[in-house]
Image (cartoon, rainbow, N blue to C red):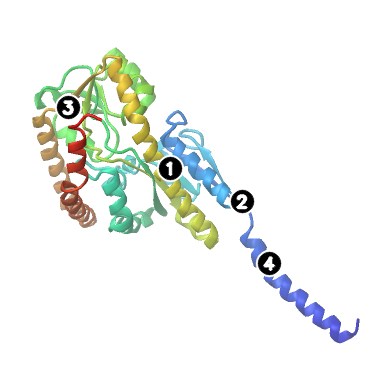
Amino acid sequence: MDRRSLIKQAGIAGVLAAGAAPAVHAQAAVRWRLASSFPKSLDTIFGSAETFARTVKALSGGKFEVSLHAAGELMPAFGVVDALQNSTIEMAQTAPYYFTGKNSIFAFACAVPFGLTARQMDAWMEHGNGRKLLDAFFANYNIKSYSAGNTGTQMGGWYRKEIKSVADLKGLKMRLGGGLFGEAMDKLGVVAQNMPAGDVYQALEKGTLDATEFVGPYDDQKLGFNKVAPYYYYPGWWEGGAELGFFVNTKAYAALSAENKAIVDAATKVAARDMTAKYDAFNPIALKKLVADKTQLKAFPKDVMDAGYKSSMEVFAEHEAKSAEFKKIHQDMRAFQRDQLLWERFSEFRYNSYMTSVKL
């Protein structure tokens, strides 16, 4: 081989080497850790994280893996936002309204009293201003947000005694979830109790707790609440649709290749849709079993609903007076909700009302 040929070949080799290096780097293995605020026993909710991780691995050909850690394994259930903010983990799965103690705006990413249903929430987040407004807020916490799935409209909880009027709520010791709901219930005289779901059964059995709200029939049946609190009320006006969240550390996301960013984006959508579909499929089956086991299914009296609405609107007004950002997000959500309710008068509501009146 002459000198000219040698230089030529060396030049080609150099170009190939230079071109290969970025390709090898782009295909380097990625390993993330996801901390959940939920136990593995909640197979619908924790299952969303499992679906996400499985989809990421499949789409990346095994080059991108996400290890899953249930509540308490890496950190306490409510420690995930601090861990993301400090870049201790790359990702979390949680209920955003758990963190209203940091800022009440967190609730809008999950559920607020008399808020959006599951489909309305998806529409506001993805094709309204919801995601844009909330991610601007979450940037303060080093977070990029996605839906992890929605429970749909929740039940109003389990009670050891009947709720016949607003007066029956006064002094009621009730386990409540996070968010602005507790503030609204406080105005109605409810004594909020904060405890892990695993401790609720025993507290109801002993009478140290009078009531609890959780999610809906599928999850509630597994926890056995019907055995110690026979009255099951509906609807859960504080959670017309509760969206669980995937929170991603913004620095970790920025470090991904364009391909891996697309994989994360796609996998969250797969997981979110699957979780919501599971609740819609499994809740009716569980509800029929609960009724067969003598659960007394009851609607909240109208005066309770009206009082809940009034107290909730007072809570929103109080927060709007303190925070211009809260007001901006709340007003945007309500404007979107008004249009959704207008449309549903002529579509879902009318259709479902008719279908429940006929025999299939």
Q: Nearer the viewer, residue 346 or 258?
A: 346
Q: Label 2 belongs to which residue?
A: 61
Q: Label 3 belongs to which residue?
A: 299
Tag in front: 1 or 3: 3
Q: Could you tell me which secondary element the residue under label 3 belongs to?
A: strand
Q: Could you tell me which secondary element the residue under label 4 belongs to?
A: helix
Label 1 to label 3, Cα distance in Å?
32 Å
Q: Label 4 belongs to which residue?
A: 21
The residue under label 2 is which amino acid type?
Gly
Where residue 312 appears, x then y in whole percent? 16, 40
Q: Residue at x 76, y 77 (%)?
A: 12
Q: Residue at x 21, y 36 (%)?
A: 355
Going from the N terminus, do you reach mark 2 or mark 1 first?
2
Where residue 147 appears, x then y in whole percent? 38, 47
Label 4 to label 2, Cα distance in Å?
20 Å
The residue under label 3 is which amino acid type?
Ala
Q: Which residue appears farthest toward the right when viewing the image?
A: 1
Crowdedness of circle 3 by 10 Å Cα count: few (<14), some, many (20+)?
some
- Residue 138 is marked as none
The answer, for residue 196, to whether it is visible in the render is no
Going from the N terminus, do you reach mark 3 or mark 4 first?
4
